[in-house]
Amino acid sequence: MSETPAQRRERLQQEAVNWHLRLTSGSAEPDALAACAQWRRQAPDHEQAYRDIEQLWQQLPTALQADRQRRRALPAHPQRRAWLRRGLSLAAAASLVLMVVAGLYPDYWQHPWADYRAQIGERISVALADGSVVHLNTDTALDVALNANERRVVLLRGEAEFDVAHDPTRPFRVIAGTTATEALGTRFVVRYDGSSGSVSLLQGKVRSSRPSAQGAQADSAVLAPSQRLRFGAGGLSAPEPVDPSTVSAWRRGRLIANFITLGEAVAEINRYRRVPIRLLDPELAQRPVNIAVDLEHIDDWLAALQQTLPLTVVKAGPWLFLHR
């Protein structure tokens, strides 16, 4: 299936970033420069994509310095007003560059040394040495440690499904923040955004636990198939029913959610887009919706959405805006 112009542009941006990071990492292979040059010569838009990344990278130090000065600036004293006015345009430009860099490539700035990573919009599967398989969803990073006594996975961010190989002598534990989920021969999904998350059991049995404050008894819960619990600063929630086919729909390239708001739907879709969709109408964001999105054709879903809801999709470069 041929890719759309938008998909090609996003793919080339991603490849250009990969090449640039590889060449500036300090550990590039001797033939990397020649390979990158060959990639750039393949087509004019290859060359343009790489030049765009180079330009952003060159602007970044100036942008960082100007943004730092803006943040440190005191309230406008009479003697400082003229200086602040002169610095306003540079600070605004700095903020724009930082927004573009952080907006397009946030996954490159977080957990760059993780054992396994899936970039935004990417889904990969990893076979571990013990026979278990880990499926990483979009924007996910994790570390793996296997030894004679334990199999431990630290989910740094994102979402992953774990298909665990049975080994009664070595428990399999997934750590997300302070929450640990232990399983023996099972399938489950853990999602974690850096402060809160969820555990959904597809098959088998798992126990999730986290330490309680001041040495109190640990908070723990056992999940049965088709159950989910949430965790966060308040501890573990009680198990609740969940549809396994919905939880794991991303494995099939689908995003399915029922009885959510349009704002929640857009937030979920944005996990798979390097440039997020902006919903400009707060009232529209509260509209209840059911969604079934093909993750390879998100723009098609947005186009169809205009036929069912009172909204308009406006495209400005790589950005998309939804409003009445």
Image: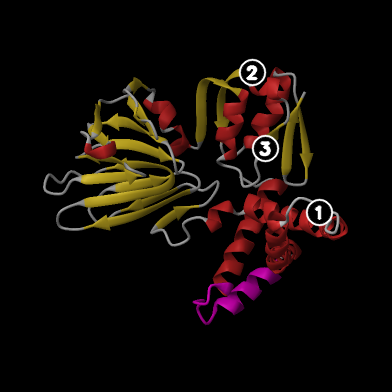
Residue shown at the point (65%, 41%) measured from the top left:
276
Name the residue tied to disc 3.
277
Tell me where residue 316 sits by quadrant: top right
Name the residue tied to disc 2.
287
Mark 3: secondary structure: strand
Q: Which mark is residue 189?
A: none
Could you tell me the amino acid type at mark 3? Ile
Question: In which quadrant of the rendered image does the N terminus lie?
Answer: top right
Question: In which quadrant of the rendered image does the C terminus lie?
Answer: top right
Q: Earlier in the sequence, mark 1 or mark 2?
A: 1
Mark 2: secondary structure: loop
Circle 2 residues within 10 Å: few <14, some 14–19, many ≥20: some
Residue shown at the point (61%, 31%) measured from the top left:
266
Which contiguous range is marked in magenta? 24-42
The reply to whether discs 3 and 1 touch (Cβ–Cβ < 8 Å) is: no
> What separation in Å lies between label 1 and label 2 (alpha carbons)?
46 Å
Q: Which mark is residue 77?
A: 1
The image shows residue 309 at horizontal and vertical percentages of 70, 19
Answer above or below: position of 253 versus 96. Answer: above
Mark 1: secondary structure: loop
The image shows residue 262 at horizontal and vertical percentages of 62, 24
Circle 1 residues within 10 Å: few <14, some 14–19, many ≥20: few
The image shows residue 159 at horizontal and vertical percentages of 43, 41
* 42 and 245: which is toward the camera: 245
Residue shown at the point (69%, 20%) measured from the top left:
283
The image shows residue 60 at horizontal and vertical percentages of 69, 64
Numbered disc in front, either 1 or 2: 1
Q: Is residue 211 visible?
A: no
Q: Is residue 274 visible?
A: yes
Judged from this view, the residue extending furthest toward the left is 169
